[in-house]
Image (spheres, rainbow, N blue to C red):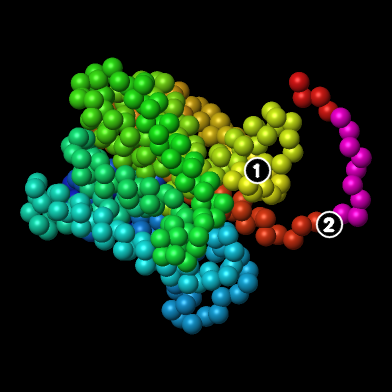
Amino acid sequence: MIGTILLLLPWATPASKPLSIIDALFTATSAVCVTGLIVADTAKDFTVFGQTIVLILIQIGGLGYATLVTMLLLTIGRQIGLRDRLMMAEALSSLNLQGLIPFIKTIVLWTFMLELLGAMFLSIRFLQDYPIGQAFYHGAFQAISAFNNAGFSSFSTNLIAYQTDLRVNLIVPILIILGGLGFIVLLDVAQIFRGERHRLQAHSKLVLVMTAFLIVGGALSLLLLEWNNPKTLGDLPIIDKVLVGTFHAISARTAGFNTVDLSQLGNSSLYLIVIFMFIGGSPGGTAGGIKTTTFGIIGMFVWTTLRHREDVNFFWCRVPTLVVHRALALAILAMFLLTVFTHLLSMVETHPFLSLLFEVASALGTTGYSVGNGGVLSLSASLTSVGKFVIILCMFIGRFGPLLLGLGSFQEKERRLYRFPESKVSIC
C-alpha cells in the first residue's frame, strides 16, 4: 500500500502521464512480489524518483519481509522469540533454527555484495553506450532486478538491444542463478570452498542437480522448438542461438528478462515456458514457483511408485514422508490455482486462451514473462480493471502463498487415540 501511494505522487511520473490507482497498485505489487509484469513503461512512464521507488520495492521483496523484520528487531534491541524464529526459518527455508540470526545477517551482506559486483560489471559494459552516471544507474538497476529475479528493466525493450552481447548474457544469468539457488545452497557451497564442510547437504545436492537439469533441458528444448523460427532464433548464428536459448531457459523459470519478443514464440515454446514458470526457482532464494526441490521430489516419488517401492531416496538419503506430502499438496494446490485464475480471467477478457494462461502462470510463478500488449508492456496493460486485479491477486498468492502453507506446519498437530481401518479403493 505504501508503494502504491508513493507511485501516485506527482514526482513519480511525468506530469503528462499520471498513473491510475489500479496501475500504481499493480506496479507496486509486481515490484514487491519480484514479478516483473508491467502496465507502465518503467523507462519512460516513471521519473528517476518513480524508478527508485520500484527498485526499493524490488529489494524489499527480494530480501523478504522476514529478513527485514529481523534486522529491524535487532536494530531496536527486541528479543526474537521461538515463534518468530520458526516463522523466519520457514520464510527463508532455513533447515534449522541454530544460527538463524547470523544466517540472516549473512544473507543481507551477500545480497548487497553480489548486487554491487553485478552492477560494477554491467556498468563497465554500459559505459560503451551511456555517460558514466547513466551507465552506473542502468548497471545497478539491472543487477538488483536480476539478483532478485524481478525482471524489471530500466530499458523500454528489456534486454532485447543486448540480445547477442556476451557480457550481458553472462552477467545477468549468473545473477539470476545466484539469486534463485537460495542462500542455504550458496552458504553450503561457500563452506565447501573454505574447508569448513567436506560434503554438500542433501538439500543443496538436489537443488544443484535440478537447476542444472532444468537449465540444460530447457535450453535444448527451446533451441529445438525455435531453431528455424525467423522471428526469434532463426536468423541468428549458431553460437548466438545457443546464447539466447540458454538465457531464456534460465530467465523463464522466474526472472522475467527477455532478449527476444516473446509474442513471436511458437505455441509449443510458450507452453513449455508455462511449465518452467510453474516450477520456478529454489527454496530460500528470491525466486517463485513451486520450487525445484518440490518438482524433484514429486518426480522421484512417481519413479518410486512405478517401481513399487515405498521410500523416496536420493543421494543415499530418504526424503521424509511428510515432506513428500507437502510437495504433493503444494503442486496440486498450485495447479488448482492456475486453473481457477485462468478460468476467471478468460471470463472477463477476450484475449487468446494461451496468452491468458501464460499471464496467470507468470503472475503465480512471479516470473514477469508476457506475450505483451503489442508494444513494450505486458498483456496485463490491456486487461480490464477486473482482469488486472486478478493478476494482482495471483502475484500476491504466488509470492506469499507457499510461505503461508509452510507456516501451517508449525501448528500443533491433532493427536488421535485411534485410527480408522484401511479400505481398498480403486483408482484405475
The amino acid pointed to by label 1 is Asn
Does residue 345 appear anywhere in the picture? Answer: no
Tell me where residue 144 sits by quadrant: bottom left
The amino acid pointed to by label 2 is Arg
Which residue is located at x 43 percent, y 79 percent?
75
Which residue is located at x 41 percent, y 65 percent?
194
State the residue position of label 1.
Answer: 313
Q: Nearer the viewer, residue 310 or 171?
A: 310
Would you say 371 lies left or right of 412 here?
A: left
SS under mark 2: loop
Q: Is residue 269 magenta?
A: no
Tell me where residue 23 sits by quadrant: top left
Image position of 91 with respect to 155: above or below = below
Residue 240 in percent (x, y) is at 23, 30
Work out how far the residue at label 1 is from the one at label 2, CA to CA, in angstroms: 28 Å
Q: Nearer the viewer, residue 1 or 257?
A: 257
Which residue is located at x 27 percent, y 34 percent?
243
Image: magenta residue range = 415-424
**Sequence-wise first label, 1 or 2:** 1
Q: Nearer the viewer, residue 229 or 57?
A: 229
State the residue position of label 2.
Answer: 415
Would you say 300 lies left or right of 420 here?
A: left
Q: Is residue 418 magenta?
A: yes
Does residue 346 appear anywhere in the picture? Answer: yes
SS under mark 1: strand
Q: Residue furthest bottom?
A: 77
Give the total of numbered labels: 2
Residue 142 in percent (x, y) is at 26, 50
